[in-house]
Amino acid sequence: MIFFRAPQPSRSPPDPRQRGMNALFALLLLPTVLLPSPLPGAPAGAPGKPKVEAAALIRVDKSEHRLELVAQGGRVIKTYKVALGSGGAGPKRFEGDKVTPVGTYRVKGRFKGLFHQFLNVTYPNDEDRARFAELKRRGEVPPGRTVGFGIGIHGVGQRDWNSVHKQSDWTHGCIALDDAEIDELSRLVPDDTTLVITD
């Protein structure tokens, strides 16, 4: 970095070289004053392009096969059509029933793998555990089954499936989007975002 020392008062006439340096310094500063600044909320390097708001809530309506990303004030940011568990309606009862759970959960962690990208969900919650315990007490749980685990929101992972996978429910209880959609959703959903799944 170059620093310029202000000229000291003197009785001699000003040095023409110093006057030229001052003019050069002013020209170097001029663009920073005249160029427009990015709009508030715009990402650096993208003047005029508003930043997409992060989701505060994920809503899944199983009957409509719809996932919505909702902003802090209640505005719906994005809507996706999804594939669900092939086990049908109702709450998840136990491991292996292929039912997408119903309830309130949170997004906890994410990783890349077989299904392109996977956002882990905090299933089971306390209600799921209590329901499972009651089913087990009544003898309605097959031997060796647990309440279940490994529920999440994920992609397809096979390019040729992206266009057809939403034609029927095929997961073991997870919520599935296209690979491009799960990439977008992952950017908009921070960890600890609330997920509400209804029938």
Image (spheres, rainbow, N blue to C red):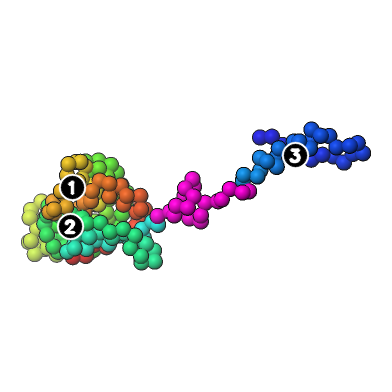
**Tally of marks:** 3
> Are the residues at dot 3 and dot 2 in contact (C-beta closer than 8 Å)?
no
Dot 2 surroundings within 10 Å: few (below 14), some, or many (20 or more)? many
Identify the secondary structure beneath mark 1: loop
Closer to the camera, 150 or 62?
A: 62
Dot 3 surroundings within 10 Å: few (below 14), some, or many (20 or more)? some
Identify the secondary structure beneath mark 2: loop
Q: Quadrant of the N terminus?
A: top right
Q: Position of residue 79 (x, y in %)?
A: 28, 59
> Are the residues at dot 3 and dot 1 in contact (C-beta closer than 8 Å)?
no
Q: Which residues are magenta?
A: 33-52
Closer to the camera, 6 or 120?
A: 6
Q: Which mark is residue 100?
A: 2
Answer with the quarter of the image where residue 85 lies: bottom left
Residue bearing mark 3: 22
Q: Main secondary structure of the magenta part?
A: loop
Q: CA distance from mark 3 to mark 1?
A: 64 Å
Q: CA distance from mark 2 to mark 1?
A: 22 Å
Q: Residue at x 29, y 44 (%)?
A: 111
Q: Residue at x 65, y 45 (%)?
A: 30
Q: Is residue 23 visible?
A: yes
Q: Position of residue 143 (x, y in %)?
A: 7, 53
Q: Which mark is residue 163?
A: 1
Q: CA distance from mark 3 to mark 2?
A: 71 Å
Q: Is residue 151 visible?
A: no
Q: Residue at x 61, y 46 (%)?
A: 32
| Amino acid at dot 3 | Asn
Identify the secondary structure beneath mark 3: helix
Answer whether residue 193 is magenta in the image.
no
